[in-house]
Amino acid sequence: MTSRKLVASYGINMNSKEMKRKTKGVIVGLGFIEGFELEFRTFLTIKRNSESKVPVVIWSISEEDERRLDEFEFVNNGLFQKEILKIKVAALTEHADQLIEVNSEGVFALAYIMNDGVEPVGQPTLEAYNLIFSAYIQNGIDITPLATALIKTWPKYDELELMKLAGYTEEEMKVVFMSLALKSILNIKN
């Protein structure tokens, strides 16, 4: 029998179609990585934040699948690194008990995390965002963490002060920034 590992996917690899293109992995559940938040650095990654949690799709993969994911995630080129993280399990698939052992504390799974300093905060491509967004919808996951990460790709300098001077409320400023972020992602020209 082939040795299996768990991988916690929080980005494009949450999307079943995309993951099936790369591996023969099997979804075993949904969960959260506590103490992290999503961050777009063109590619989606996670960073430590004790007050946040990141939703994940938990996959069971083979050693060969892991090698293939390493290639797709550019591990050998230094873009991403692998880390074993504790995953709080929220839901399991019907065949999960045949593939993994779960206790009340959760499971440990492999996660691919972008190395610091490799890419600055930046917006994803429309194609990448759509793949991730569709995975959230497909798996019934709240999109708030994803939308929040997208909003944070926008610069935070003088625009806020100008908006305050113009009399915008904080809620109005959030709407404006979300609109600008979506406009950029959708590549809408004036």
Image (cartoon, grey):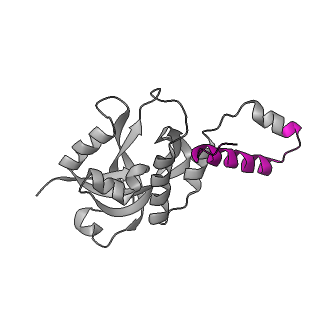
Q: Residue at the bottom extreme?
A: 94
Q: Is residue 182 magenta?
A: yes
Residue 30 sits in quarter? bottom left
- Quadrant in the rendering for residue 49: top right
Left-right relation of 179 to 135: right
In the image, is residue 97 above or below residue 132? below
Q: How many marks?
A: 0
Image: 50 above or below 61: above
x, y (%) of residue 40? 52, 40
On-image quarter of the C terminus? top right
**Residue 47 x, y percent position in the rendering:** 50, 39
**Residue 100 is at least partly visible in this image:** yes
- Residue at point 50%, 56% (across, down): 133
In depth, the one of 169 and 189 nearer the eye is 189
The residue shown at (10%, 58%) is: 1
User: Is 9 or 19 nearer to us in this picture?
Assistant: 19
Vertical relation: 42 (above or below) 186: above
Point out the residue furthest to the top here: 117
Residue that protrudes farthest toward the left in the picture: 1
Report if residue 67 lies within the magenta region: no
The residue depicted at 67 percent of the width and 48 percent of the height is 178
Q: Quadrant of residue 181?
A: top right
| Start-end of magenta stretch | 164-190
**Residue for point 32% across, 63% down:** 28
Foreground of the two, 126 or 140:
126
Taking the image as drawn, is residue 103 in sight?
A: no
